[in-house]
Amino acid sequence: MKTIIIMARAVSFSLSLGLTASALAAGAVAPEGAATIVTGYAGRVIDVADLGHGDSETLVEATGVSRNALGQTVFDNLRARCLILARIIGGQPMAAIGACAETDNDGDVIFSSFEGDVRKLTGGTGKYKGISGTARNAPTPQPATEHGTIDYSVRQEVAWTIK
């Protein structure tokens, strides 16, 4: 039981450092801009690989919904799904790495990858085709809403361009 608690805390810490969701709302998207987004996530541990000596790698699936903090339609109401690899090496949580796909109400998708607190927008479909950009994340752990989840919110400062 103690090991599970330690791993859950490390996963929560690593997730909070690494997660962000970049989301744009349905409709026209400006060719460039910036927004402040808050995404609520629930993370579920898929598997844990014990690497010995207290080291481990944990694969987590996180899902959530993004909201534009200023009430704008851009980056609002996207469904996010991320796969995250959280690592403990030498007894210390390392920066989480992973990738996300975020889908708007029209079915258009934004793809991104992240390491630590930096996310890179890497492309998209539909109105997001050609999107690139970055986001800085400020995560906050939240009380779990379901048994077996790791919940948190991430405030993101997103800047993008679409070519």
Image (cartoon, rainbow, N blue to C red):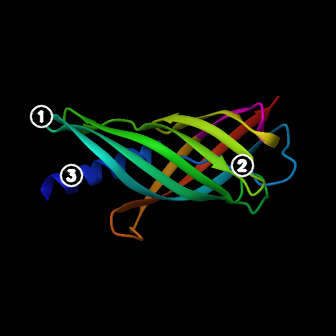
Local secondary structure at mark 2: strand
Residue 124 placement (x, y as % from top left): 72, 37
- Dot 1: within a 10 Å radius of its alpha carbon, few (fewer than 14), some, or many (20 or more) residues? few
Residue tagged 1: 53
* 140, 81: nearer the viewer: 81
Circle nearer the N terminus (1, 2): 2
Nearer the observer: mark 2 or 3; the answer is: 3
Q: Tags 1 and 3 in contact by the CB under 8 Å rule?
A: no
Taking 162 as reference, is 12 left or right?
Answer: left
Q: Amino acid at mark 2?
A: Ala
Residue tagged 3: 6
Local secondary structure at mark 3: helix
Image height check: is 68 above or below 122?
below
Choose top left, top right, bottom left or bottom right for residue 162: top right
* 116, 121: nearer the viewer: 121
Image height check: is 37 above or below 56?
below
Q: Amino acid at mark 1?
A: His
Image height check: is 14 above or below 130?
below
Q: Residue at x 72, y 52 (%)?
A: 75
Local secondary structure at mark 1: loop
Taking 6 as reference, is 159 left or right?
Answer: right
Q: Residue at x 39, y 67 (%)?
A: 144
Per the picture, the main secondary structure of the magenta-coloured stretch is strand
**Circle number at residue 122:** none
Q: CA distance from mark 2 to mark 3?
A: 35 Å
Circle nearer the N terminus (2, 3): 3
Residue 76 placement (x, y as % from top left): 71, 57
Q: CA distance from mark 1 to mark 2?
A: 43 Å
**Circle number at residue 35:** 2
Q: CA distance from mark 1 to mark 3?
A: 14 Å
